[in-house]
Each structure stands twice: as C-alpha cells, then as structure tokens.
C-alpha cells in the first residue's frame, strides 16, 4: 500500500520532507499540503507534489479522508494543536521537535495518546537514526560493560545575535538530551550547568560555551560541552566510558589528504549536512509504521521527558553550578 | 510516473534488487519476474512483489507491454542475450557485471546500442556510487593536482578452491578496473602482473596475492594489490598521488573502542557489507533515467573496456612481469 | 665540567635515575649514594656507579665536598628534610614528587629557597618534558586562540586495595594539576569533584572513577576524569578548547595493524612506559642547570601550589559537588 | 671508561655528531678533529669541543694515540680511505653513508675488516634506530605472519636542479634499500623501475617520481614510490603485508587540531627532523660498542650490499621496466 501523507507547514523542513517522500523513499506519497503562507504550499505542489491538494488549515488537512498520515513541520508553537488533532482523528503523525513548546503541552499529547490507547506520534529526534549513533549504541550495549560516564560535545560554528543562553538548551542540547537517554536506556535525575568565561565571539545575551552535566538514575554522569560559536566547525562528539572500556561516535566520512604540509580532512560546517542521511531513515520508519496505522521511533513520552529535562537545564543555568533535580511522573504502560 | 520493472534472474542479487525497488526506493515497481528456476521467481513474488507476473523466459518478459525497464541479474553467460533483447525492444536495461563474458560479446552490445542511437544500458559497477569514491573523485578533481600514481588494494578474507588465478582479474580486480578509469577519467594502455611468493593459504590453482600494474594514456601508473585469501578482512584501499598532494579513500564507518589494551575498530569481513549503500544509489539512478526512457551511469562502452582490460591483465599473468598492451577501438560518439 | 651527583634513596626510581646519569645522559656522574637500606645503595654501586661513595645518611651525603648536586628519590615523607638540607648547603637539588607531604612543608621549602635568593630546586613533574605535552603547549600558545576549556582523562588499569579515594588526587591527579597549570600558564581558583556510581572493579575504600573540575583565574574550566581501575589500559588524554579551535595531546607512538578483522594498535598498560622518555629530558635539564649552580624546570612554588590544589580537591571529594575555593599567597619574585 | 673520539669531516653532520657526543650522550668525548677546511674544525673546537686537538689529515687523526675511535663524516668520496685506515689501525669507526662510492670500494672495506677478524665498522644507516621502525620490526617478526609484500614511499618536498635521476637511488632510496632488508631479514634478487609521467615540478635531468620494485630471495615483493619533488612534505611510509595481516610504520608524533573546518596535523617538511632522535640512538650504540673495541649495528657487509643493490636499481632505470638481477657473493662468517 502507499501511505497518503499530508504535510502541515511547507517551509524548509516540510518541503524537504515532501521531497524525501515523493522522490527518495518508497511506500508513501504526499497528497495534501497546508501552510499559513499558501504560496509556500503552492510552490511545493508545483515542484514536488503535483497531485497534492492544498488545504487552508492544518485541521482541515487532518480531517481529509484522503490523508492517511500527517507530518507536522510547521512553526513550533503550533505543533501541539496539530498533533492533538491528528490523535483525535486516529491518524499517525510525525512531529518535528519540539513536540510542544512547554512540558505541560507535551503532557497533554501524552495523555491524549494514552487515552487513544495506541501509538500514533513519532517525534523528529533524527539522531537515533544516524548510522554512527546506531553503531555506537550496539557497541555500548554489547562490548564495553555498563556505562559509567559520557563525555560529549555539541559545537556549532556560529549563531545569530537573537540566539540567547536558554536556546543553547532548547534548540541545541535538546538533541543530546534525547539521544543520550536513548543511548544509555536510562533517565535523568539532575542537571548542573557550569560556565567558563564567555568566548570572545559570544553575544550580549549569550553565555557561550557552557558545560551541562546530567546525572542518570543509574548513576552515570554525562558532561556535554555546548559551544555554539566555536568558529571552527559543526562537530558532534560522544564518548561512552564503561566498566570495561570506551566507545566513541565516529567522525563523519571524509577524504584524508596530504597537502601543503598538512595531513587533514574537512570538518563539516553546516549542521544540515551532519545528519542528512538520518532524516531519510527516520521518515522511512514513519512510513513503515504508518502503513500499519501506528507509529515507531521516538515517542510522545520521549518528547515530554526532553521538555522536562530541558526546563531543568535552563533552571540550572541560574544556580551557579548547583544541581537541579529532574523528577518524572510514572511512565505510562504505552511507552514501556 | 512509476517505472514498471521486470527482473530476469531472481537469485540472491535479483531478489535483493527487487526488494530495493519495492521497499526502499521510490519511483518504480517490480511487475515481472523470470528465472530458469521458476520456484525462485515464485518466492520473490510471494515475499516481495505480490503483483508481479512470472514469465517463462527473459525474452517474453522483455517483450511484455507491461514492462518499462529490465534488470538483468541472471547467470553471467546469459547477460549478453538479454541485454541485446532489451536494446532491440528499446527498453532501459540494468545489467549486473559482466556485461558479457567476452570482449566480443560486449562489443556486440555496444554496436547494438550505437545503432539504436540512444543510451539504454547501465552496467552494475556500483563503486561509482559509493559515497567514499564519489568524495574521493571530487577531491582528486579539485585539490591534489593532476594524478601521477595510484596505490590500491583489494583484499578479501578467503575464496573457495574453485577460484583460480584468472578470476582474481575477472571477478575481483574488475571493480578496480572500472572505478579507477572513472576516477582518473583516463584509459589504460598497458598491464603488468607481478607475483610475490604465494601465500600459505593460497590454493593449488590460485597464485595469490598478485600485484597488477596498469599504465594510463596520460602516464599515470596504478598498482593494485589483489589478495583474495588475506585472512584478516575485506579491505578496499585507494590512494591517489597527484602533483600537489595525496587523497585517500576513507575507511568504512566504524566505532573506535578502547578495550583490553587495544585502540581498535572492526574491519569488515563480508564484501556484501562494503558497498551495500551504493546498490541503493545505483538503482535509484537507473530508475530516474529509465523514467525518461534512457540510461545513466556506467555504460556499455565501460563494460566493453573493462572486458578488454581484464583480458590484457589475464594475459599479463603469463608474461613474467612484461607489459601487455591494451588497445581500444575509437570511442563511439554516444559514449563521449 | 662533569656535575658530581649524590643520590638519596636508591630504590626503583633512584636506581633508574642513577642509570640515566651514568649510562644515558652526558655531563654528570653519580659520585655518592645513600639509602636507609644500605644494601640497596651497595647494589647500585655494584651495577651502575662503581666509583660512588656510600653515605650513612642523606645529610652526610649532602655535606660531602665531593657532591655538587643532589637527587632526592627517597620515601616521600623524607623529601622535605633533604631538600631543606640541600638548600642550606647551596646545592642544586632534584626532588621527586611530592616536594613535601603537606602544603606547609612545601611552603617551608619555598621560604628557604627565597631566603637563599636563587633557584636550587627542581620538582620531578616529568610531564612538562614529555614531547607530546611540549608540542601541545606550543600549539595552544600559538594556534587555537585563548583556552576556554580543557577535557582531560587519567586512566589506569588497576590499583591495589590500599589505594584509597584521596590518593586519586595526591598520587594520580597531581600530574594533571601541575601540567595543566603549566600548559595554561594560569592558576586555579576552585575545585569540584563529581562521583558517578562506583565502577564494579572499585574497592571498599575507593570511589572510582571521579570527575575533578578545576576553574582557573582566567575562567577556564577543566574537567579531568580520574579512573584508576579502568581495566583497559594506561591512557592519558588532554584536549584544549580555545577561542578558534581545539588541540589534543597525541596518542603514544604505536604500530597500527590490520589483523583478525580489527584495525588496531596497542594501548599502554604500564604507567612507567608512558613518560619514560621524559625522565631523560627532565634529568638532562637538571644537569645543565646544576652545572651552572642553579635549577630549572618545575620549581618549589609549583610544588607548593600543587600541594594546595591537591588539598582543595581532596576537600571537594566531601562536598557533594560544591566548589571548594583555592587561595594562594602572593607569588614570590623568585618564581615570576 | 670514556671513549675518546676523533671526527674526520666537521661539516654539518660532523659538527652535529660532535655536539651529540659532547652534550647529549654519555660515555664518550670528542678529542680530535680534522677537516680539509681547517676553519671548520676550529669552529667546532671553539663551540663544542674545546679540548680537542686539530689534525691536518684524517690519517694523522686516526694514527693519534689519543684517539680510541673514529667518526668518518667527510665528503663521500673520501670515506673509503679513512675507513680502511681505521681498520688498519684497529680502531672502531662510524662511517656515514655511503661506506664507499662504489661497490668495489665497499668490498675492499669488507675484505679488510674480514682480514682483521673483528667488527670495527658501523655504517650510518640511522633508520634501523628509529623507534617507529624498531617497533614495526617487532610487529612484523611476531604478529602478522611471514611477509609477502611491502608497500613503501619516500617523499621529499623538493630537490635542487643538480639532483639527477640516479641520485633518487643513491641518495634517497638507499635508506629503504638498507632498512627494508633489515626489516625483512632477507636479501634482494632483482630490481625493476617504473616511471609514471614526470611530475610538473621535475627537472630537466630528473625523472620524478619513480617506482622501484625489489624482489627478495624469499619471494617478497617490495614497491617503493620515490617522489623527491612531491611538494607537500617529507613523508616516509612503510606497510608490510604478511600471511595473517598488515603492519604500518607510525606517522611522526603530531598535535591534531580542529581549526578552520579542518581536522589536521602537520606533516614534516625537512628530512632532518624525521629521524633526528635516531641519530642519538645510533651514535650511543657506536659508543657502547667502541668502549669494547668493536662495532655494532649496520656493518660493512650491509654497506656493500646496499651499494650492489643501488647499482642494480640505477641499471634498472634504463631497462624500461625489465628486471635487473642482483647477485651477491657469499656472506663472510663475520657478518652472519
């Protein structure tokens, strides 16, 4: 069967996902588009999905009998309403991060999905589909003994002036928050944030870099360097220290050259290149599950826990290195 | 549009390509199957392509009005007849290597395609679609100056007793023959083969390893170590030395561990894992071109040149290190 | 001139230094030996320094007119008395770490040397002479911009039962305390210690691993993983993150092999192998300075600061992650 | 005892060895100097060896009762006469390469040393003392099974106009000729040379690069890329392929940085830096043996075999890829 997909929000990421579905992946077709800016949907229809219908609102798109499953790639503040509508309609829904802009909003989605009784939501945490993280998880699970520490870094060459200190958590660290929890199969119990002196390239409203330290329920300590104006490149590092040894995330594939007295290879500079292949895999996973009327991969609970953890990290930016507790409600059976 | 594909030869590789088309890639569908062993086609129909018709012969499959394009994944000795039939029918045709079992057979395909006047054939030289080789070619073309030497190795852990010395060329080196010609955008003018003492794991009818040395029209010298019983792993190496510097093919992605007093990562042992991703890319390229009624990627001429070059290398296995000349006819305009 | 050296303490390290002086390095000769265990000195005389006189006490050795300079390689608790005696005699003195077993003791040495008015003491912090750290310092000083963070690790395969939690600072972390201060040319202002769950191989009186976080006067934050039962090897890591980029300590030289489906090289397992070459360099530096009647390299003040910092780190092992301030007196002009 | 050394030839390398003996190494002292340019010896006396006597000729220096052992670091054409004189005097003699400028000259030295009945000569093949080659030999001898192939490269950034094609063998490849024979513990039986098109930076009288292929008595095939105008750096590579796996010479120690979108480290550009540490070790070995009245390390026979092999390689530069046989006389018992 071919899954008929409606895309809500046809900006950069929505357009790119539409291209994936219609040109790269098998088993699905974009049949409906909606955006507050109708011209944006018209353009996607023209360039990528000529057979798609254009809907005035996301709610109408979700309600259409022609739509089997929904992609929510609109502005973050609208995610919650569309995901709730999709759940109400019983339709599988892929939602880009954040699932909601508040932990309470995410909780409402969890509650709705639990009430529905079946998984319908996949959150767009694409790193879980990255070949490097997948291989790392396999190694961590089988070769190095139980994890004790994680040393990670999320470095980005530059951010604009409007990027302020809490965004280092909500927009940047959010990926580590989800993927490390998945990697360790563990939950967080506390967060600390340490600030070295701010880098010279930092901004008036941004303290950059920062070191976020998370502790898990099993006592693993994770340190994550977040450095969003690091200048030299987009660089994601992750090293897991276990009882018996250490495993590290691979560097992205690159050609090594010997040139001008340097042995070297390129480091990526654009975040969009780093996990590009994982977007294909996550969306294929969504299509496969949607064909069966359900959802797979990162779930609403994961989105909710990420929201709670992010809030604790932001709170910890203000406590001068003291730990902020992270407390989660009981995990519903749907997400065990 | 969806390209309707018929698969001739539904053994391991044909079955796997059918899976790719129906489950992984977009834009095509398997509608017809044929195999000398009908049960094999029945199994693919059952597991992968429920809507496909089964044909008694490849020729009937090619003739079917329901079939837009053909995959030739049958036994090598039958490739030529099916490719010629597909050209006669004016249908795009993907043919696994070898294009034909003799240079003369490949020449007949070239002639038929030239007479047809439009490209219809893609040969299954998948390395050209490997992300590592693609990146290497880009680096060679732009960063290291004109190539002067290539040092390459094709190492395989073990081969069975029936693998004899010439197969090191026809079955193994054939990939380097095509991909290095593409990488350098050059033609070969001579081949030498040097034999070190045979490895202890070699067989009665196999002199292993061997070093094949090719010279190109522009004077680049290529040495390729072919070692098919190297024991330790499946390992493909390629280093290009240019006027200004050197570029090397990347190692496959692997998790580095620190364990038991070793800093290490896995080396692949099964050739099927090394270029697995490139099969998806090559077949997607075929589908895209077939949708336009033509073919892309490695062409009949490439298949013919590979056959001529292989024959020269095999001849050079008997000349005690003396160079054997490689002479090509003029390249038809269709392949310029 | 040949510097005539007396060695106080002829156990493993004293004996090895005697061998260096008499068999490897130029410009010095061992002329005197002393040890509480006279048989130990007799053995060194027999095997390495046949012309050396044996003295009943370190004080007598120091007083001998035949002795130009002194090596203090005795039991740590005796270092202070011998170093003070050497200063009193106006003789250059190389003292293995610790300079004294308490910060107060180290301060008495500083005061005595300042009163003497000229440098006479070199402390055995050999890492400053390691080719890797020397190259790292040069890179940090010239290429990566001002340092902002340091990520370091000190991993050791196993320690005996009598190794207790504070020893992770006094015996292990002490090397990072000195070498990172030298590397950054900065002073520490606070220390924190975080404990993940203890590793399964830890002992009853040892919480292992631990993460020590130091902050410097310029606001650089340093995290050091101390893991003394890490099992897999002796592994020293150091990465400096600067305004413009990152520099890392090289791995020790090792042969990379491709064997048994692994691309690998050995990791050291014995700490004695890691900095073996730096012992030669540090002692040669001592000899060169001693020939001029003075001392070079890590000085008494460095030893004193290391003692104060160690004490703060040990205190921080008890504060549940809260920062412990590190306060230093004004640095005497002799050590500017 | 202190070995009293006379240095014949006080140009760059002689001066540097004098410095080693007097300032770095233990167990020896420069007591005599001689050079055709007396001012050169005066300068070394002034700067490095104030107690040394200056002799008008090398022969007088060798004859001096004050001289225990001799360093021959004069112009290559004079090596033979001084080495023969040292043997006649029964004095240990370290001779920089070449041992003699002709194979016949080297044979006369072998004959004289055999007649003397005891080893007195060490040839300055310093690579055997390089820590990387020493570790590689240990790995080759114990871990990878019997060697079957060696892939090596000797790359140099630039050479002057007067460097002509045969010098690529006599001055450059000579190091691989000796060190690979030692590494494999095998003898050469033939040489081939292949020339790719000449690099654009090559000279009128220099065909650069070239690929020299040596075969050994046990059937190992060695390919060595010699590229003396490679532009990018001074780069020595060596990979040994054995029955069970592969071992590679380590890269020189270098700081890896992440800077400006590059993961990189420096490649050396000056050959003098590459083996600098091995000069210390080889000369220390000479001193230790000379103290016992004999010599160690690379011997006269090694120098003679290197000369014969070099001659064969130069002959092979003219045979258009055909093999030139290398025939050695029986090895005298002194060198077994």
Image (spheres, coloured by chain):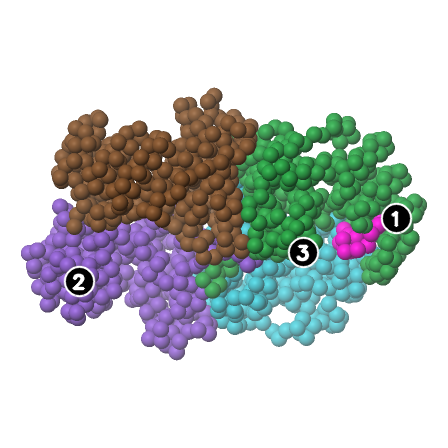
Chain colours: A cyan, B green, C purple, D brown
Say whether disc 3 or disc 1 marks the residue closer to the N-terminus: 1
Do the residues under discs 3 and 2 have CB atoms within 8 angstroms? no
Instruction: Bin the neighbour count of mark 2 within 10 Å (Cα to Cα): few under 14, some 14-19, many 20 and up.
Output: few
Of all residues, the one furthest to the top in this rendering is D204
Count of number-bearing discs = 3
* Circles 3 and 1 on the same subunit: yes
The quadrant of the image that shows the N terminus of chain B is top right
In terms of depth relative to the viewer, which is nearer, D242 or C145? D242
Residue under pointer 1: B58
The subunit carrying tag 2 is: C
Describe the element under mark 3 as helix, strand or loop. loop
Q: Residue D34 versus residue D157: which sits nearer the camera? A: D34
x, y percent for residue C336: 22, 49
Give the class, few, some or many, for how many residues have Cα within 10 Å of label 1's Cα (few <14, many ≥20).
many
Contact between labelled residues 1 and 3, with CB atoms less than 8 Å apart: no
At 67% from the left and 38% from the top, the residue drawn is B315
Is residue B187 visible from the viewing direction of this image?
A: no
Is disc 3 surrounded by few (<14), some (14 to 19) or many (20+) residues within 10 Å? few
Where disc 1 sits, the SS reads helix
**Above-or-below relation of B56 to D216:** below
Q: Which residues are magenta?
A: B1-25
**Image quarter for residue C315?**
bottom left
Q: Residue at x 42, y 51 (%)?
A: D137
| Horizontal and vertical percent position of residue A94 | 72, 58
Asked if labels 3 and 2 share a chain, the reply is no
Give the residue number, with chain letter if any, for mark 2. Answer: C46
Q: Nearer the viewer, mark 1 or mark 2?
A: 2
Residue at the spot of label 3? B160
């Amino acid at each position: 069967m071919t899954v008929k997909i409606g895309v809500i929000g046809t900006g950069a990421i929505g357009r790119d996902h539409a291209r994936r579905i219609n040109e790269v992946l098998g088993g699905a077709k974009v049949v409906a588009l909606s955006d507050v800016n109708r011209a944006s949907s018209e353009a996607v229809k023209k360039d990528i999905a000529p057979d798609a219908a254009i809907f005035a609102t996301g709610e109408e798109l979700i309600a259409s009998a022609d739509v089997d499953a929904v992609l929510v790639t609109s502005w973050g503040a609208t995610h919650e309403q569309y995901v709730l509508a999709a759940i109400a309609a019983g339709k599988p829904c892929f939602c880009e991060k954040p699932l909601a802009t508040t932990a309470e909003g995410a909780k409402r989605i969890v509650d709705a999905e639990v009430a529905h009784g079946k998984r319908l939501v996949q959150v767009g945490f694409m790193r879980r589909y990255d070949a490097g993280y997948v291989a790392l998880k396999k190694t961590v699970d089988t070769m190095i003994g139980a994890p004790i520490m994680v040393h990670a870094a999320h470095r980005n060459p530059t951010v604009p002036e409007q990027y302020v200190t809490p965004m280092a958590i909500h927009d940047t660290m959010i990926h580590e928050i989800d993927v490390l929890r998945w990697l360790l199969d563990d939950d967080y119990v506390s967060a600390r944030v340490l600030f070295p002196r701010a880098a010279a390239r930092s901004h008036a409203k941004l303290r950059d870099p920062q070191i976020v330290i998370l502790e898990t329920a099993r006592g693993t300590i994770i340190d994550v360097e977040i450095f969003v104006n690091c200048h030299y490149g987009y660089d994601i590092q992750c090293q897991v220290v276990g009882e018996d040894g250490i495993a590290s995330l691979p560097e992205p594939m690159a050609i090594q050259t010997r040139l001008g007295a340097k042995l070297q290879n390129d480091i990526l500079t654009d975040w969009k290149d780093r996990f590009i292949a994982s977007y294909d895999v996550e969306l294929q996973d969504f299509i496969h599950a949607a064909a069966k009327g359900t959802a797979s991969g990162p779930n609403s609970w994961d989105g909710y826990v990420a929201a709670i953890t992010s809030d604790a990290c932001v709170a910890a930016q203000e406590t001068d290195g003291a730990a902020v507790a992270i407390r989660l409600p009981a995990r519903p059976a749907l997400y065990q």
